[in-house]
Image (spheres, helix red, strand yellow):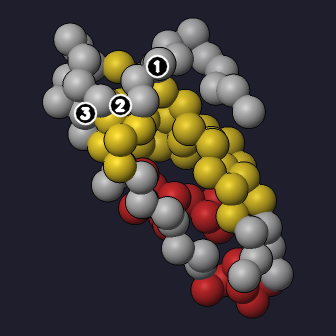
Amino acid sequence: MGLSGAQESSRKVIARTAPSYPELAKKMHLSGKVKLEVVISPAGSVTSAKLVGGNPVFESNALEAVKQWKFESAAGVTKSVITLEFVEP
């Protein structure tokens, strides 16, 4: 599965935190994917993230996880679109 967008980043993820599955989604028996646009600092940390697609039920858990991700270093700030999948446990 590729990433799409004009400002796509080719920076590799070096540390990934899996999102927790939301309680509300458990009650509603939901699964799904969310797309997040992230801004990555030159040092490789996520400075901001926002939901750009998918079910808002998963938004806060996805944002909380992706803000802990680390990417390889680069010369400047880059943007990337990340897709996370939530599957009912």
Viewer-proximal residue among 12 and 61:
12
Q: Amino acid at mark 1?
A: Ser
Task: Name which quarter of the figure residue 40 lies in.
Answer: top left
26 over 43 or under it: above or below: below
Alpha-carbon span between mark 3 and mark 2 = 10 Å
Alpha-carbon span between mark 1 and mark 2 = 10 Å
Residue furthest out toward the right: 29
Question: Which residue in the protein does label 2 denote?
Answer: 39
Q: Amino acid at mark 2?
A: Val
- The label shown at residue 44 is 3
Q: Earlier in the sequence, mark 1 or mark 3?
A: 1
Name the image quarter holding the C terminus: bottom right
Judged from the image, the secondary structure of the residue bearing numbered disc 3 is: loop
Q: Amino acid at mark 3?
A: Gly
Question: Which residue in the protein does label 1 denote?
Answer: 9
Q: Earlier in the sequence, mark 3 or mark 2?
A: 2
- In the rendering, at what x and y percent does residue 8 appear? 52, 17
